[in-house]
Amino acid sequence: MHIDRRTLLAASVAALSLHASGCGAATPAFPLPQGFTRFPIWPGKAPGGDAVTVIEKEALRRPDSPPDDTYFEHVVTPTLTMLRPKKPNGAAMLLVPGGGYIRVAIGLEGYEIARRFAAAGYTCFILLYRLPADGWTAGAEAPLQDAQRALRTIRSMAPREGFDPARVGVIGFSAGGHLAAWLATQDAKDSYQPIDAIDRQPLGVKIAGLMYPVIMMDGPFSHTGSRRQLLGETPSPERAKAYSLEQNVAADAPPTFIAHAVDDKTVPVQNSIAMMLALKRQNVPVESHFFEAGGHGFGIGAKSAVTAAWPDLFLAFAGRHGV
């Protein structure tokens, strides 16, 4: 099953028209960077939005940011933004930007990352996902619904785009690392009711990359901002444990690459250490790099030269595992 170009274009126009005509109408979008294309992942409106009244917004990440260094808040129309490689290697990568589950930093951890991996041959897809505190019926599961639908959409496009649907990886950053790990390393259970042929595509990825990820939702090393957005101010211990990914790694989780700076003052490095050990307990292949310096959110434009090697390390890992 695949989506043809005409269907995608029609779906995009229809979704954007709906989006602009009522509750949740977006502010004017920043132009897409050259070479990127964007389309919605759901036909019509995203599921469970009857009580959603937020207004989607895109803005510069900092006042002095270049035009493509943006973030989204209050996402109403989840999308994939695709960048095709000049020399395809037959694989695809789903990129999941972070933002503490309160925004999605699509510039720093989307466009920049896609350019680097497209240069290595990957067809790249950046996920713009809904945020859990915006009133969606699914609540905390809304971002997972988007991640699962995005993965299936990518697989459905494989014949047209010329990559192997079995060679799809995911890489997530910060809170996007939590969502990527949720998608990749937990038992693959549907988070929404199937709606069309795309939902017959399987879940599961070939490899996962977790960059300075939020993993824990309980204990002293949890990222309180992400936990608050995902689970509310005072989640029960049982609920916090259920969303702490190191406590719920599936035995069939894919080979996983982890990178974190030890001096990260936003998401403690103990999140990545705990995830590495959880994967090892399940005998899942795992490679971890704990950099001396780099802080949080080092992305591709490394704040510290110490972290600059991570893309090459990840690419070598991906190659060893068939992606």
Image: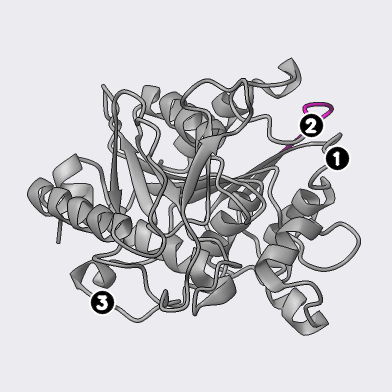
Q: Quadrant of residue 236?
A: bottom right
Segment colored magenta: 289-295
- The amino acid on which the numbered mark 1 sits, given as a three-letter code, is Lys
Name the residue: 75% across, 49% down.
Answer: 272
Say which mark, if any, is on residue 299: none
What is the x, y in percent for residue 51?
A: 47, 78
Q: Given contact means CB atoms under 8 Å apart, are the residues at marks 1 and 2 in contact?
A: yes
Q: Quadrant of residue 192?
A: bottom left
CA–CA distance between discs 1 and 2?
7 Å
Q: Which residue is labeled 1 in the image? A: 265
- The amino acid on which the numbered mark 2 sits, given as a three-letter code, is Gly
Name the residue: 31% across, 54% down.
Answer: 20
- The amino acid on which the numbered mark 3 sits, given as a three-letter code, is Ile
Q: Given contact means CB atoms under 8 Å apart, are the residues at marks 3 and 1 in contact?
A: no
Tell me the crowding category of disc 3: few under 14, some 14 to 19, or many 20 or more residues within 10 angstroms, Cα based: few
Reading the chain from its start, which is encountered first: label 3 or label 1?
A: 3
